[in-house]
Image (cartoon, rainbow, N blue to C red):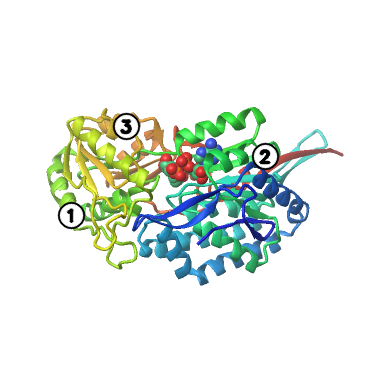
Amino acid sequence: MNIQNYINGQFENPSSKSWIDNYNPSNGEVYGQIPNSSKEDVEQAYQSARSAFPSWSQTTLEERSRILIKISELLEANLDRFAEAESKDNGKPVSLAKMVDIPRAASNFRFFGNAITQFASESHESVGQNAVNYTLRQPIGVVGCISPWNLPLYLFTWKIAPAIAAGNCVVAKPSEVTPMTAYLLGEICNEAGLPKGVLNIVHGLGTTTGQAIVEHPNIKAISFTGGTATGAHIAKVAAPMFKKLSLELGGKNPNIIFADCDYDDMLNTTLRSSFANQGQICLCGSRIFVEETIYNKFKTDFVNKVKDLKVGHPSEKDTNIGALVSKPHLEKVKSYIEIAKEEGATVLFGGNEVSVEGYENGYYLQPTVIEVKTDDCRVNQEEIFGPVVTIMPFKTEDDVLEMANKVKYGLSATLWTNNLKRTMRMSNQLQAGIVWVNTWMMRDLRTPFGGVKASGVGREGGFEALRFFTEPKNVCIKY
Ligand code: NAD
């Protein structure tokens, strides 16, 4: 099936006539092609967005809200179709796409459809000076949204929904590795009555299409989620043009387990935080630190649970772990398992590719648990982004805090303890944008979302996102 760009409400082939193969990770086969859109295609998308902007930015909040909520309802009504498409494109279990990816994409539109009706700005009375200030929050104009392959529609809509809710028009690019649900979203937007040109979706490689969006002189803000190296490159291109930038980048998140935690809850959640979505979630807790008094028990229990996870075809109901997203990514993850061995670590379980009957060319890998002796090794410092976790014991709170903070990243951290004072101390000191205590990936869409250090700049979520997608203008009136 060939995918087309969605520009000005129409589906179009790229003017470049250049196409990229689209792979199905569950069997390694090419099942369609996607445009590799050129600078000219991006320009066409920009022109369409620019033309739509005067009217959309003046559309009442109630009307914008109504359309966003309609998109949300249509996504819910098409849950099965979208979940199956997401799974085929990405390799994730259909059950996961049905439970997490597509419902969350629908929630993104519903949430920002509601949030925009509650978004307010400030006024300041300059007491004693007969003046009052009020602050307008105006849409920026045409903005660019670029997203990765791990949670394709979920992260794509997490940017688009606040951008259009705030009155902007968008040129958006999903990952070239997982373009399908973004393509299908165009149909839903038309059906929901989103005016032509408010959202334009261009497909293609980062280095061609993505780069053209970032370099475009009149696309005034870029909201990007992806790898840290790409984020650094985008920052370099966008900074001299003074674009507003939101960068959500990589992570190497600690999962810190104290002996006083609720053990069973911790164990079950740790299984999820390690391997959900084949470990390809930026929030996965890939470095597990366990207090030494329960280390051996944890090691045995955890490995036993991991052994029970079923690696299988994404459409099988009992599959826990589907296929990794692509052949190059599978090779990258496998290379880290080799690096771990070379560094003297012990593979406690996994480490090998899995041949799934009937789908022998799919990109399947066992969930892998590696015991490391030191936190300084590469597998504990570099982002692997696959079904691979490391475990090691720690003695004291200070020791584990130091190790948790020693990486270049700072996206999220998970803490398992029932000690209130320790919770407060550690939550304050962990270098991360998000700290979960006795839970993982529990999300309230009103909260700020994002990382520190090499995990990015800026925050998404709630009013933070609406602030990002608007320009404040202060008006001072003397009376
Ligand atoms: P990536 O950086 O390779 O690609 C992300 C997107 O950027 C894709 O759409 C790609 O085409 C585009 N891109 C690539 N080069 C570009 C360029 N020069 N200009 C403009 N766009 C360009 O990342 P990926 O491999 O798709 O995703 C995995 C990474 O994303 C991991 O590092 C993961 O941690 C990160 N991630 C972060 C978050 C978060 O919220 N912080 C969420 C999910 C994933």
- State the residue in front, 418 or 186: 186
Q: Is residue 104 left or right of residue 73?
A: left
User: From where the camera sits, is residue 136 visible?
Assistant: yes
Instruction: Tell me how far mark 1 sits from mark 2, CA to CA.
Output: 49 Å
- State the residue in front, 2 or 319: 2
Q: Amino acid at mark 3?
A: Gln
- Image marks 3 and 1: residues in contact by CB distance under 8 Å: no
Q: Is residue 453 left or right of residue 218?
A: left
- Image marks 1 and 2: residues in contact by CB distance under 8 Å: no
Q: Which residue is mark 3?
A: 381
Q: Amino acid at mark 1?
A: Lys
Is disc 1 surrounded by few (<14), some (14 to 19) or many (20+) residues within 10 Å?
few
- Label 1: which secondary element: helix
- Label 3: which secondary element: helix
Numbered circle sitting on residue 113: none
- Image marks 3 and 2: residues in contact by CB distance under 8 Å: no
Instruction: Tell me how far mark 3 sits from mark 1, CA to CA.
Output: 25 Å
Question: Where in the figure is residue 237, as x and y percent of width and height?
Answer: 59, 31
Q: Which residue is mark 2?
A: 220
Numbered circle sitting on residue 307: 1
User: Residue at point 56% right, 69% down?
Assistant: 74
Q: Amino acid at mark 2?
A: Lys
User: From where the camera sits, is residue 247 visible?
Assistant: no
- Label 2: which secondary element: loop
Determine which quarter of the picture holds residue 323.
bottom left
Question: Where in the figure is residue 349, as x and y percent of width and height?
Answer: 17, 47
Instruction: Tell which residue pokes out farthest to the right in this image.
Output: 479
Is ligand 1 closer than 8 angstroms to the Cβ of mark 1? no
Q: Is residue 353 left or right of residue 247?
A: left
Question: Where in the figure is residue 334, as x and y percent of width and height?
Answer: 27, 41
User: Residue at point 21% right, 47% down?
Assistant: 352
In this rendering, the answer to whether 390 lies above or below 356 is above
